[in-house]
Image (cartoon, helix red, strand yellow):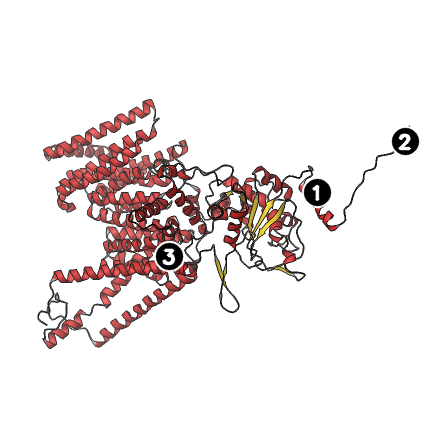
Amino acid sequence: MSSYELSQGTVNNIQLFLKGLILILIAGAAISSRLFSVIRFESIIHEFDPWFNFRATKYLVSHSYYEFLNWFDDRTWYPLGRVTGGTLYPGLMVTSGTIWHALRKIGLPIDIRNVSVLLAPAFSGVTAYFTYLFTKEIKDSSAGLLAAAFMGIAPGYISRSVAGSYDNEAIAITLLMAAFYFWIKASKEGSVFWASWAAVFYFYMVSAWGGYVFITNLIPLHVFVLILMGRYNKKLYAAYSTWYAIGTLASMQIPFVGFLPIRSNDHMAALGVFGLIQIVAFGDYIRSQVPTNKFKSVLAVSVVLIIALGILGLVGLTYAGLIAPWTGRFYSLWDTNYAKIHIPIIASVSEHQPTAWPAFFFDTQFLIWLFPAGVYLLFQDLSNEGVFVIVYSVLCSYFAGVMVRLMLTLTPIICASAAIAISKLFDVYLDFSEYLQSKVVVQETSSEKAKEEISVTTKSKNHTVFGLISKLTVISTFAFYLYLFVYHCTWVTSIAYSSPSVVLSSRLPDGSQNIIDDYREAYYWLRMNTPEDAKILSWWDYGYQIGGMADRTTLVDNNTWNNTHIATVGKALSSSEEVSYEILKEHDVDYILIIFGGVLGFSGDDLNKYLWMIRIAEGIWPEEVKEKDFFTANGEYRVDDQATDVMKNSLLYKLSYHRFVDLFGGKQATDRVRNQKITKEPDLNIVEEAYTTENWLVRIYKVKDLDNAGRDLIQSSKFEKESIAGVKRRVQKRPELDLRE
Amino acid sequence: MAIVKRTPAAENSAPVVPSSTPSSKSKSNVVADFQSSLETTINSYFKTLTPRLKLIDLFLAFLVTVALIQFIFVIVVGNFPFNAFLAGFISTVGQFVLTVSLRLQSVNHKEFGISPERALGDYVFASLILHFIIYHFIN
């Protein structure tokens, strides 16, 4: 009671302490909510791409860095191989490799698998911190703290960063936020120092994720919009020129990116804005020296000339072939049907599908309706940083609508602008200082309130009881929304995003959990029972997993760099046995692995992906594989006895339903995914069943060798079947006894 | 396209100038304006030059010359070690923009809120990063 006035310094210290504490708690919440999958299942790498990253990381820690960069992988894309070192983004592997080495140095030898599994949750804590800094630059630290909390637990980001989801995005979003934070800071202060940091993080981002192109275009766009708004200043010049010069040069150090930044159209916007800002800076200098009216005419002439020249030059260079035109993935962003028509391989990837509208609410809950409010508030007092957020939101909202995976880049800005909206609201409605102040005035006692900056001036007393009630109502409503948000996030994370998809789980009728571990069962079988150089043919989805878990050579994998090779596999699976056998033999295939969900009711199996295989194969051999042959006359996709002959004779169909009827022991055999009845056992000749897992989810077949007697396999297997059935039909050829004349 | 856009731009400027010429003469007016503003700029440039700025500008001129020499070399001889050419060329461009930034910061340090000493420190830091990467890139 001795002194009720705290000094400014003490208040600052308390604020600093609280901020630190809150940020640590946010990081803790972010990390722990991503550990559901480890607790539910085990510490395992998830899905498909992470298995490749994991395999590459293991290679990196067991070899030197230079060997890693020069890594030619002959165990994938047989017989082509893959120049892995030159075609990957090494950022992720190098990061976890560095962490692994560092931990060993300080005497904490940790399995590289655990480093990989826990990398994404650890980085999510860092992301929350950078989101705090980013939003703090745009509004203030209270908005920053809210944004950090949202970012920590928003399902849109959790979907790609749960423990075990060891993917490029795991660190890329962190780097994205870091690069943007440094950029905002640099453009605000005009500091070369911060711009260099932005460039360094940009380089890190380039090394980690192909989505770096987003930064490459967003920052120039921000600058361009500012110039168009007449907001050019010298700070912008210093920040942008530094960022571009260092960032571009640095990005060319990544082997996979190479000379793209000066050759491809995706990067030309940045170069163009770089040129433009030089000219604008020069013009700005002239303007400071000459009277305005003279300058206007000068400016008009030169701007028109320069833009015309620039566009002409760009078009000319593109036609001359010096600059690569935009890539297919880029076109598919603008024309959603482009990929379907020209490159089915891109359209077939599930994360490239357009987003379903409920997904927005599912992934961000109430932030999605606060997001426009936040953007609107930024329009109210349009600062340069605000323009950045607006440009970012507009662009990314569109992109997220086109491609599911880009939801990930939208989430940070949703969190930031929703936090701006809420904190603006709280600034108004949480401000009870008027009431406190009136107490001070009325009671005239030395209260122990910490608010020392309240000036004791009698304002107009419009704060009635109703004012208080309305404030409390709004606050409690939003507190309830926030509570619901946390509840929703936890629920979504635990239900939807924590499944490793390598291990499936289902509920038995009595409610207990049943773990379906067929994938690993099959991969383990391959690892233990096949020769080390066996070549496994499967659809590309499973390539990385086979490489990672079974350690066998695959024909195609999730890298999808060679469309023709994938089409070959598609053709092998969708043709008749005779055609397939030739392809299988040409590629030295020893085993075929397929996924069949008909017994279990697992809908993501190969027969449901079949149309994509057919489409991709048709893209290369339109004469031999035709999509419409697989549909019935009514245009239905059927697998029962009404299926077309082409369908029934195709290899994948036969592989899927081989011995399927026997399984039901006389009862009606029903495919549980497609709800169709299978009546006839398909006739399978060129392969023999090698292994089928417990729930029939994975089936492995061994490709038969060429027949010893030189017959083709269909004849020889017919012969064998008949000999087993006991109707050995010997056609004895009797000598012809034609009498000679 | 360019001509269509040029005319309204000149007309817009016409009301601003009190003794405006008819729009038919606006082209020659523009050129004259251009020349006179260039002259004013050059004159004021030499007026405000300090020895320190002179040093910076000499360095800038040197960088432009080196860049030009490299560019001509590539056109005449060919760009065989493309890495080396890019590294050399970008090093001059990068150093150029960094130096221009330094110049802007040291002239307008009130607008930037950055002291000339810190500007120099930032400049050295960024140049070190730039040249480290170039050293790595040049093979």
* Residue hosting label 2: A739
What's under tag 3, amino acid-wise? Answer: Ile
Q: Where the N terminus of chain A falls, by quadrant?
A: bottom left
- Between the C-alphas of marks 1 and 3, the distance is 55 Å
- Between the C-alphas of marks 3 and 2, the distance is 89 Å
From the viewer's side, name the closer residue of A340 and A120. Answer: A120
Residue furthest to the right in view is A741
- Element on which disc 3 rests: helix
- Between the C-alphas of marks 1 and 2, the distance is 35 Å
Answer left or right for A722 relative to A285. Answer: right
> Residue B88, position in %: x, y?
27, 30
- Element on which disc 2 rests: loop
* Residue hosting label 3: A158
* Residue hosting label 1: A715
Chain containing the residue with disc 3? A
Contact between marks 1 and 3 (CB within 8 A): the answer is no
Residue A217 image-quadrant placement: top left
Residue B25 image-quadrant placement: top left
Q: How crowded is mark 1: few (under 14 residues within 10 Å), some or many (20 or more)?
A: few
> Residue B38, position in %: x, y?
18, 33
Residue A357 image-quadrant placement: bottom left
